[in-house]
Image (tube, helix red, strand yellow):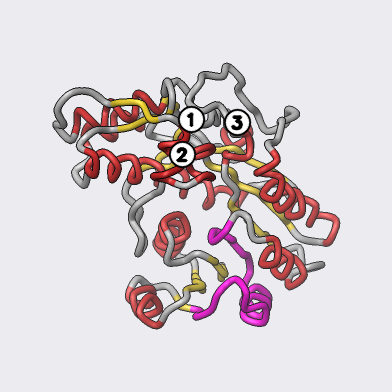
Amino acid sequence: MKIFLTGASGYIGGSIATALVTAGHTVDGLCRSAEKSRLLKQAGINPVIGSLSDEKTLEQSAQAADAVINAADADDPFAVEVLLRAIEGSGKKLIHTSGSSIVGDRAAGEYSSRVFHEDITRPICFEKIGRVAVDTRVIEGVARGVHSIVICPCLIYGQGTGLHTQSIQIPLMIAAAKKYQQARYVGKGENIWSTVYIKDLVGAYLLALEKAPAGSFFFLESGEATFKEIAETIHHRLALSGTAQTWTIEEAVQEWGQEAAHFAFGSNSHIRSDKARSLLGWTPKHASALDWLKTASNL
């Protein structure tokens, strides 16, 4: 199968791209620079130089492919609409990557018992309305003759296999711990995020290409942890003195910015992936980000 993939030089997209090539697919990967183009070519990926705002490039690449995977930006409505229009009426698969902060709350480190499944009503914070609207637009692509699928992972961890090997949340916590010689969490740190290992996540994309029904939405998770647990594990692993310490939400904003402080580190994002397991036959092999942190060699 020939697949057009946006975000081919990124963490998620790059890992998907290498797995697709290994599985025997042809991958045309969108990237921004000549240097990344050269590196993608070395990895067996056909580089397409451009960005999400290059409408003609997106349109032509999508139309030339058998399927499209958008792994570049969960919040870009313009790119999504170009891709939908490009393959409208074709029945081709479009897999769009979202993220589970869509169920995040402004908890500032407080615990919430709420757990979200794909088919239950989800309260959406104002800040996440745009992402939810993009997800909805993709799913509604079914009415336009597109075999549309949304994959919504949670906190991703592990070494990526593409050009960019690091995820976002845990590496930023590690960087802050090294900077201040003390691991940090927001408030009480009792907020919970579901977690998923990068290779397990990639496996779900390959299964979705083969099995996902049109118009489907999949949460992806395997395990969970509080941010205090993550911070304490990082602190211990880096052999720092004392113990991990709390930050106020204001202090976290100063270090990580508003969106990350409130949603990536201060919120609860607690999900279940029953549909991926039942409809795709997804069987993740890793269930603990904490266990991975205790043994990872690249902290």
Please identify the quadrant where the N terminus is shown.
Answer: bottom right
- Front-most of residues 184 and 39: 184
Question: In percent of the image, x 24 and y 44: which residue is there?
Answer: 179
Q: Amino acid at mark 3?
A: Asp
Q: Tell me which segment is drawn in magenta.
A: 48-73
Q: Amino acid at mark 1?
A: Trp
Nearest to N terminus: mark 2 or mark 3: 3
What secondary structure is found at the residue carrying circle 1?
Answer: strand
Please give the label number shown on residue 155: 2
- Front-most of residues 268 and 251: 251
Residues at circles 2 and 1 in contact by the CB criterion of under 8 Å: yes
Q: From mark 2 to mark 3, how far is it between C-alphas?
A: 15 Å
For this view, does 86 lie left or right of residue 190?
Answer: right
Q: Is residue 75 above or below residue 281?
A: below
What secondary structure is found at the residue carrying circle 3?
Answer: loop
Residue 4 placement (x, y as % from top left): 57, 70
Question: Which residue is labeled 3 in the image?
Answer: 105
Q: Residues within 10 Å of mark 3 (few under 14, many from 20)?
A: many
- Front-most of residues 134 and 261: 261
Residues at circles 1 and 3 in contact by the CB criterion of under 8 Å: no
Q: From mark 2 to mark 1, how far is it between C-alphas?
A: 7 Å
Residue 163 placement (x, y as % from top left): 35, 64
Question: In percent of the image, x 44 and y 37: which residue is there?
Answer: 196
Q: Is residue 151 above or below residue 141?
A: above
For this view, does 118 lie left or right of residue 145?
Answer: left
Q: Quadrant of residue 100?
A: top right
Question: Which residue is labeled 1 in the image?
Answer: 193
Q: Is residue 102 above or below residue 240?
A: below
Q: Quadrant of residue 23?
A: bottom left
Q: Is residue 224 above or below residue 22?
A: above
Instruction: Tell me if I can see residue 217 in this picture.
Output: yes
